[in-house]
Amino acid sequence: MTDDPSAALYLRDLGELLKESALSARDDRDETPVGADRAFADGRLMAYHEVVSLMQQQAVAFGIDIGGLSLEDIDPGRDLV
């Protein structure tokens, strides 16, 4: 991924934290009743969907192993909708 071990650890940790936050946002949305709060929860989840998708796409484009970002086991199209 990178020759700098600090950068590799940072990226791995960032990916793991984003994944956990995204899945938490999905669970929060699923528990929120329909209404204004639900619209906010939907928007929050959509934002995580875009961020995780972008990180995965850019990793592929730059030849970075998605596993090194801790994002190999999340599919935004399946897990963040």
Image (cartoon, rainbow, N blue to C red):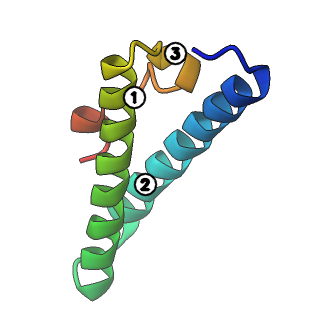
Are the residues flagged by discs 2 and 3 in contact, CB closer than 8 Å? no
Q: Amino acid at mark 3?
A: Gly
Image-quadrant location for residue 55: top left
Mark seen at residue 31:
none
The mark total stands at 3
Mark seen at residue 27:
2
> Where residue 1 appears, x then y in whole percent?
57, 14
Upstream in the sequence, badge 3 or badge 1? Answer: 3
In the rendered image of this protein, does residue 48 appear above or below residue 39?
above
- How would you rate the neighbour count of disc 3 (Cα within 10 Å): few for under 14, some for 14-19, many for 20 or more? some
Upstream in the sequence, badge 1 or badge 2? Answer: 2
- How would you rate the neighbour count of disc 2 (Cα within 10 Å): few for under 14, some for 14-19, many for 20 or more? some
CA separation in Å, label 1 and label 2: 15 Å
Most foreground residue, 31 or 63: 63
- How would you rate the neighbour count of disc 1 (Cα within 10 Å): few for under 14, some for 14-19, many for 20 or more? some
- SS for tag 2? helix
